[in-house]
Amino acid sequence: MKSTLAGTGDIAPPVAIGGVGGSGTRIVAELARAMGIHTGTDLNAASDTLWFTLLFKRREILSCTDEEFTMSFDALRAGLCGGRPFGPGERSHLHGLCRSERPGHSVEWLSHRAASLEAAAAEPMPPRRWGWKEPNTHVVIERLWQYQPDLRYIHVVRHGVDMAFSANQNQLILWGPSVLGNSEAPSPVRSLAYWCHTHRRIQRLLAANPRRMYWLDYDALCREPVREALRLAAFLECDLEPARPVLDTVRPPAPPRHAGEDLRIFPPDELAYVRSLGYVVDAGAPSEGTYPPRQAQDPTAT
């Protein structure tokens, strides 16, 4: 299904979905795909676009040259759009990304991603709306906008204190030294510090880019799936109807992970920041998170 801008025959802008790992990005990716957005053919069980993982989930991306970043983004776009076989320089770039293993990714795993990306780029495809879902997208979203200014970015947010007790701390391990300035072992305290730093930055970006970024509260989506999905569809300028079966799989929010935990381990200012986003930070209390500026960024309300 070709996704077009409402009332036109033009292909709508590409879409990216990200968030701190474990925020609920999988269900958002499934909604986006059901609404006609192609996110690639090399996906894992969490619906991550693994070509993005190959190209961008590495510490070197933070300091790479513009030439290297451009080559990586062009390769991602070619794989998602098809019809443009890679040249020698692009193949050399991909092979270079597979020479050494990374945390959680072997050389063999990386090589499989490079091979599938090259095959997809060479395959002719009809014009269609494209995008990707990979939680680490937020780390480089500003630079991505330099190369694709019309990119619509969806940032999925979940209760920060609950996330501090999540088993998924892969982003903290990878980006923590750069973001927090040290290499301490993962812990709930360090996890919340990373979450607060990330979302303060995302808030600033949202304020500056209200038409190309959307703050999606995962807990709100679980409580009111149709209402929240309609807002998302309006931001994307998509028809929600094909995604109705996906909404049937959405379940109410789970009990808070931080119930019964000693929250005195966290700095008071960070707990206050989580509360400022509308989340209840009391052991045993249900998550009631909403993000106040969401109404202002809803295209149907502006």
Image: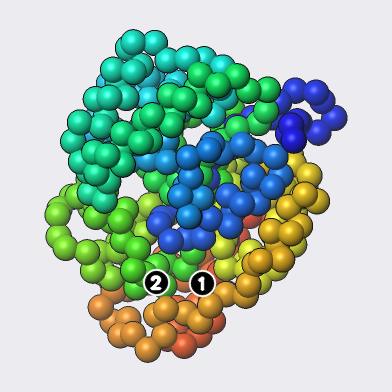
Number of marks drawn: 2
Instruction: State whether residue 117 is above or below residue 181.
Output: above
Instruction: State whether residue 22 is above or below residue 174.
Output: below
What type is the residue that disc 2 sits on?
Answer: Val
Frontmost of labels 1 and 2 is 2
Q: In this view, does 80 lie to the left or right of 258?
A: right
Quadrant of the image occupied by residue 230: bottom right
Q: Mark 2 points at which residue?
A: 161
Foreground residue, 183 or 272?
183
Q: Is residue 300 left or right of residue 156?
A: right
Foreground residue, 253 or 295?
253
Residue 75 spot, x, y in % from top left = 43, 23
| Secondary structure at numbered mark 1 | loop
Q: What numbered label is drawn on residue 140?
A: none
Instruction: State whether residue 76 is above or below residue 195.
Output: above
Q: In this view, does 259 lie to the left or right of 292?
A: left
Residue lying at 69% horizontally and 58% vertically, measured from the top left: 246
Where is the N terminus found, in terms of image quarters?
top right
Quadrant of the image occupied by residue 247: bottom right
- Give the crowd class for mark 2: few <14, some 14-19, many >=20 residues within 10 Å: many
Residue 198 spot, x, y in % from top left = 38, 52
Asked if disc 1 and disc 2 are in contact, CB closer than 8 Å, the reply is yes
Mark 1–mark 2 distance (CA, rounded to whole Å):
9 Å
Q: What numbered label is drawn on residue 279?
A: 1
What type is the residue that disc 1 sits on?
Answer: Tyr
Residue lying at 59% horizontally and 28% vertically, measured from the top left: 150
Q: Is residue 299 visible?
A: no
Residue 302 spot, x, y in % from top left = 75, 44
